[in-house]
Image: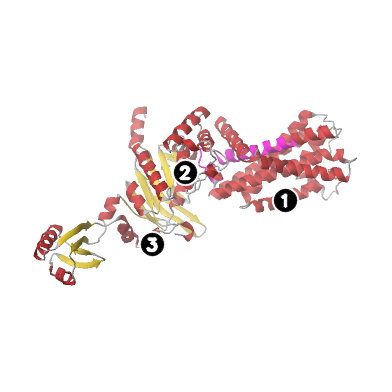
C-alpha cells in the first residue's frame, strides 16, 4: 500500500512537471474560467455574486476534465502510458497517480481564481475548510471522470467530444444557473446522477447559502463514491484493452 | 527449502520459460502455441519478419498484454499471477523509445528508478552512472524530446537498467537507427551480456541476430519454426560446399578448360570470380593447383563459401530474403 501510494505520488509529480504546470497549460487552465466568469459578469454584474460558487465548480469541471483527457489520450497515443505499465505498479496505481496530477491542477486553478474574485468582489467565504474540502474532492472526482472518458477513446478530439456529452447537460441541470429544487420533477433525477450537482451544492454552502439537496458532508461522500466509480470503470477498461 | 539450496536451484533454473503461449486479436492468431526457454546469462534472439509475433511475445512477457492461454515464468514468477514481481526483475526496451519528451534525460531516469521502488538518492546516483556508461553525460539536462533517435534509444535502454535487472527484453533495439548508432547499441548489448544479464532480443535483422545471440528462435506467423545456435542453424543448411576463385590472366579458353577439373561438380562465373561447387575441398585444391601450374596462371583470391544465417533462414522458413528487409509500415 505504501509503495503504491509512493508510485502514485511520483506519477502525479511527473505529470505536473511534464504537462500541467507548463506555462501554456496554466494559461489555458486560467483562460477558460476567466472567459466564463467575465461573460456572466458582463451580462449581469449585480446578480453575479450568486453565480460565483456554481461558476467556480463549473470551471473546475471543465479545466480538470479537459486537461486530464488530453494528458491520458496523448500518453496513450505516444506509448507513454504503456511504458508506465512496464513498471511494477498496478493499473489502479497508475490511474490514481494520473487522476491526482489532474486534481492538483484543478485545485491550483480554482484557488488562484477564488483569491482573484475575493479581491475584486465583496465575497464572503463563510466556511473555508468546507470550501477546500469541496474543491479537493470535486477535483479528484472530475479528474477521474476525465480519466474514464480518455481511456474509453483513442484520439484527443474523441475524448473532448465524449467529455462534452457528460459536461454540457451538467451546465444546465446541476444548479449553476437554475437551482435543482426549481427543476421540473421529471428532470430532477437526472440532476441527482450528475457529480457537478453535489459539488455546486457543497461549495454554495461554504459561501453561506443553505443546502439545496442534502447536508454538504453527504454531498462530499457522494462525490467520493463517484470518484471511485470512475476510477474503477477506467481501470476495467484499461485492463480490458490489455487482454 | 534451506536458503543456500534454494539459491542453487534458482541459479540452475532457466531465467525465462514459455510454454504453449497463445494470443489472438479477434480472428487473427498472433501467437500459436509457442514454447521456449532462456538460460541464465544467455542472449536469446527471436528472429522473424514483421508481423511474426515478436512484439506480441515481448508484450506478454513484460506483463502489458494478457495471453489467451499458456504459461510464462520469469525467474520462477508467473506473469499472470505475479506480474509485479516479474516486472521488478525485468528491464524492457519497447519497440519505440517512449520516455517522456518533456522531461530531461536525468529526470526520465530518476522517474524510472522511483517507480521501480528505488530511493530518490539511489536513483540519482544510478542515473549519473548510466548517463556515463551510455555516453550521454553532456545531455543530462537536455529534454528527451530534443535528442537524436540514436540517443533516445540509448536513454531508453539506460532507463530499463536503472534497477539493475537480471533479465532484459529488447524489442527491435536497432530498428530505425543510423549505422553508427546501431553499432554503438550492439556494443552496449555485448557489454550487458558480459555483465551476466539474460537478454531476450527480437529483431528482423539476420546479421544482428547472428552477431549478438547465443541461440535463436525463428518465428513465422506466430509459430516457432526452430531454435538453435547460429552455427548449428548454418550447419543445418543443405547448400553445397563452394569455393570462389579469381585467376589471372583470364581468357575464354581457360573458362572452357575449367570443365576438365573433375573434383568440381559444377562451376559458374560471377563477374570476375569463378564459383566451383565441390564435394571434397582437399582434392579440389590439389587439382586446382595442378591446373594453375599447367596453364601458367596466378590465383588472385581464393575463398571457401560457407552458408550464412540468411541462407539458413530462407531454407528453414521458405520465405524470400527480401521479406526480412521490410520495415514496419511497408517501407524499406
* Magenta-span inclusion, residue A107: yes
Quarter holding the N terminus of chain B is top left
> How far is disc 2 from disc 1 in space, using C-alphas?
40 Å
Mark 3 chain: B
Q: Quadrant of residue B100?
A: top right
Outermost residue toward the right? A46
The residue wearing badge 2 is: B151
Mark 1 residue element: helix
Pointer 1 indicates a residue of which chain?
A
Residue B65 counted in the magenta span? no
Say which residue label 3 marks.
B322
Residue B148: image x %, image y %?
49, 46
Q: Are marks 3 and 1 on the same chain?
A: no
Are circles 3 and 1 on residues that touch, CB within 8 Å?
no
The chain containing the residue under callout 2 comes to: B
Q: Nearer the viewer, mark 3 or mark 2?
A: 2
Between A121 and B295, the one lying in front of the other is: B295
Q: Are marks 3 and 2 on the same chain?
A: yes
Residue A209: image x %, image y %?
A: 85, 34
Name the residue that disc number 1 marks. A164
Identify the magenta region: A81-110
Q: Is residue A195 left or right of residue B309?
A: right
Q: Is residue B68 visible?
A: yes
Whole-Å distance between the Cαs marked 3 and 1?
49 Å
Amino acid at each position: 500500500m505504501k509503495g503504491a501510494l509512493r508510485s502514485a505520488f511520483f506519477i502525479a509529480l511527473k505529470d505536473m512537471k511534464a504537462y500541467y504546470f507548463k506555462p501554456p497549460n496554466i494559461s489555458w487552465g486560467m483562460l477558460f474560467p476567466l472567459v466564463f466568469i467575465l461573460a456572466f459578469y458582463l451580462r449581469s454584474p449585480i446578480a453575479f455574486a450568486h453565480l460565483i460558487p456554481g461558476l467556480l465548480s463549473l470551471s473546475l469541471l471543465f479545466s480538470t476534465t479537459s486537461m486530464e483527457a488530453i494528458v491520458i489520450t496523448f500518453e496513450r497515443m505516444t506509448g507513454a502510458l504503456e511504458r508506465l505499465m512496464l513498471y511494477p505498479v498496478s493499473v489502479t496505481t497508475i490511474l490514481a497517480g494520473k487522476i491526482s496530477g489532474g486534481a492538483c491542477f484543478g485545485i491550483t486553478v480554482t484557488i488562484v481564481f477564488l483569491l482573484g474574485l475575493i479581491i475584486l468582489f465583496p465575497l464572503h467565504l463563510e466556511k473555508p475548510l468546507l470550501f477546500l474540502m469541496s474543491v479537493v474532492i470535486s477535483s479528484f472526482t472530475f479528474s477521474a471522470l476525465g480519466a474514464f472518458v480518455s481511456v474509453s477513446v483513442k484520439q484527443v478530439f474523441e475524448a473532448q467530444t465524449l467529455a462534452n456529452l457528460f459536461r454540457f447537460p451538467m451546465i444546465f441541470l446541476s444548479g449553476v444557473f437554475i437551482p435543482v429544487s426549481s427543476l421540473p420533477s421529471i428532470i430532477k433525477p437526472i440532476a441527482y446522477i450528475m457529480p457537478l450537482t453535489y459539488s455546486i451544492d457543497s461549495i454554495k454552502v461554504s459561501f453561506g447559502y443553505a443546502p439545496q439537496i442534502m447536508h454538504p458532508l453527504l454531498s462530499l461522500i457522494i462525490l467520493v463514491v463517484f470518484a471511485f466509480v470512475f476510477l474503477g470503470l477506467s481501470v476495467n477498461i484499461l485492463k480490458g484493452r490489455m487482454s | 527449502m534451506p536458503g543456500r539450496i534454494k539459491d542453487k536451484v534458482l541459479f540452475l533454473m532457466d531465467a525465462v520459460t514459455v510454454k504453449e503461449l497463445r494470443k489472438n486479436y479477434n480472428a487473427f492468431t498472433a501467437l500459436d502455441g509457442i514454447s521456449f526457454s532462456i538460460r541464465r546469462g544467455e542472449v536469446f534472439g527471436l528472429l522473424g519478419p514483421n508481423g511474426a509475433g515478436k512484439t506480441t511475445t515481448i508484450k506478454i512477457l513484460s506483463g502489458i498484454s494478457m495471453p489467451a492461454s499458456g504459461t510464462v515464468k520469469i525467474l520462477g514468477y508467473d506473469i499472470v499471477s505475479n506480474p509485479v514481481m516479474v516486472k521488478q526483475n525485468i528491464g524492457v526496451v519497447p519497440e519505440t523509445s517512449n520516455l517522456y519528451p518533456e522531461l530531461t534525460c536525468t529526470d526520465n531516469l530518476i522517474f524510472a528508478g522511483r517507480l521501480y521502488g528505488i530511493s530518490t538518492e539511489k536513483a540519482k546516483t544510478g542515473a549519473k552512472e548510466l548517463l556515463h556508461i551510455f555516453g550521454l553525460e553532456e545531455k543530462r539536462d537536455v529534454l528527451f524530446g530534443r535528442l537524436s533517435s540514436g540517443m533516445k534509444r540509448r536513454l531508453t535502454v539506460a532507463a530499463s537498467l536503472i534497477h539493475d535487472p537480471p533479465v532484459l527484453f529488447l524489442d527491435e533495439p536497432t530498428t530505425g537507427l543510423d549505422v553508427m548508432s546501431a553499432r554503438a547499441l550492439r556494443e552496449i548489448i555485448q557489454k550487458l551480456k558480459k555483465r551476466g544479464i539474460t537478454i531476450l532480443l527480437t529483431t528482423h535483422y539476420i546479421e544482428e541476430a547472428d552477431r549478438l545471440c547465443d541461440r535463436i528462435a525463428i518465428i513465422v506467423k506466430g509459430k516457432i519454426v526452430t531454435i538453435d545456435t547460429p552455427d548449428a542453424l548454418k550447419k543445418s543448411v543443405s547448400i553445397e560446399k563452394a569455393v570462389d576463385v579469381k585467376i589471372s590472366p583470364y581468357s575464354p579458353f581457360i573458362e572452357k578448360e575449367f570443365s576438365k577439373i573433375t573434383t568440381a561438380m559444377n562451376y559458374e562465373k560471377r563477374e570476375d570470380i569463378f564459383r566451383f561447387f565441390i564435394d571434397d575441398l582437399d582434392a579440389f585444391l590439389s587439382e586446382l593447383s595442378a591446373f594453375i601450374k599447367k596453364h601458367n596462371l596466378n590465383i588472385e583470391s581464393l575463398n571457401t563459401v560457407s552458408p550464412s544465417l540468411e541462407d539458413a533462414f530462407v531454407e528453414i522458413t521458405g520465405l524470400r530474403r527480401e521479406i526480412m528487409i521490410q520495415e514496419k509500415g511497408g517501407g524499406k
